[in-house]
Image (cartoon, rainbow, N blue to C red):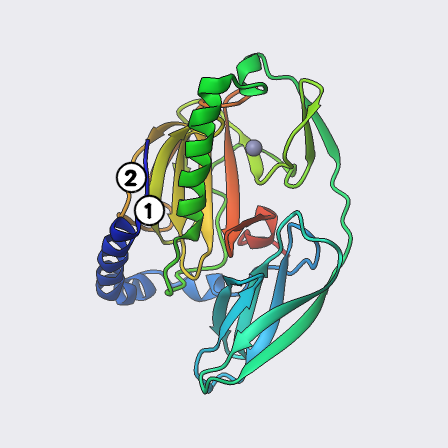
Amino acid sequence: MIHIDPARQSIRYLLVSCTLLLCCIPFAASNADEAAYRTLPLTQPTPGGVVILNLGKPDSAKPKAQFNDIPVAVLETNAGWHAVVGIPLSTKPGQHQLDIVHDDGSTEAKTFQIETKSYPEQHLTIKNKRKVNPNEEDMLRIRQDRTDIANAKRYRHPVVLSTRLDLPVEGIRSSSFGSRRILNGQPRRPHGGMDIAAATGTPIFAPADAYVIETGDYFFSGKCLFLGHGEGLQTFYAHLSKIHVEPGEQVKRGQLVAEVGATGRVTGAHLHWSVGLNRTWVDPELFLVDAK
Ligand SMILES: [Zn+2]
């Protein structure tokens, strides 16, 4: 079982920091389209969506921001600093607050509204019944998997490599993010990603420059991979047949990172692709390069 302990995290942090320092200039120079990718994701002020709040003028120092006590991504454009806030699917509609600490130490609270969004119900039949009703031994593994996943989701690096993402695999895309899943007639957690159907062995490419946070083999997710894109923006790949990268490695947009498979809890071969901000999964559609 794979763990990320704080010591290992800090070693990785140093490793990635050094790599980024060495690599950030060549990245920018080698990709003429990079400027086009720097635009922010689309906003959608609903559970599972993204809220963007303006934090200050372009010439001011970078502020810090937290939502529900979790640091959020703070990104700069020509218009100034922006908090890019992932809204958990479990968020109640209504008024919420972002806590900001400016460079001079002054604090500010910005409020914003979250609107209702009703996600559809999705009924699926899973042949392997243990994947819906795990036994005691499975539950031990699932608890460990959840700890590993929570640790991986905490990992963040301050450098934003890109906020706009390419689709990582060619295939049939379902917009099932957020759907309330009923597996073999039993309600389960809402769907935290986009499913892209493709044959086992179909190549999966990094959707943007990234570093490899973690790989794992979990009861539900099967073989899986976490990529970090900076400031807590993460992408997650599940049900893989093969993984071609290792934790701590730096990868470029378009680089082969894994292959589609049918490991874990699946109805067939596909890529489950999640996009995370401030440790919560949000709708991947909002980040696609061609999203309007
Ligand atoms: Zn999925």
Q: Amino acid at mark 1?
A: Val
- Say which mark, if any, is on residue 245: 2
The disc, 2 or 1, on the residue closer to the chain's N-terminal end is 1
Asked if marks 2 and 1 touch (Cβ < 8 Å), the reply is yes
Label 2 Cα crowd, 10 Å radius (few <14 / some 14-19 / many 20+): some
Q: Please give left or right for residue 56 compared with residue 246 in the image.
A: right
* Residue 238 x %, y %: 46, 33
Quarter of the view holding residue 127: top right
Residue at the spot of label 1: 212
Name which residue lies at 49% across and 81% down.
102
Q: Say which element carries label 2.
A: loop
Q: CA distance from mark 2 to mark 1?
A: 7 Å
In the depicted structure, whether residue 255 falls above or below residue 70 = above
In the depicted structure, whether residue 185 falls above or below residue 72 = above
Instruction: State how many labels appear.
Output: 2
Q: Please give left or right for residue 106 compared with residue 212 in the image.
A: right
Name which residue lies at 65% across and 47% down.
89
Quarter of the view holding residue 98: bottom right
Q: Amino acid at mark 2?
A: Val
* Residue 151 x %, y %: 40, 46
Q: In the picture, which quadrant includes the C terminus? A: bottom right
Name which residue lies at 69% across and 36% down.
179
Label 1 Cα crowd, 10 Å radius (few <14 / some 14-19 / many 20+): many
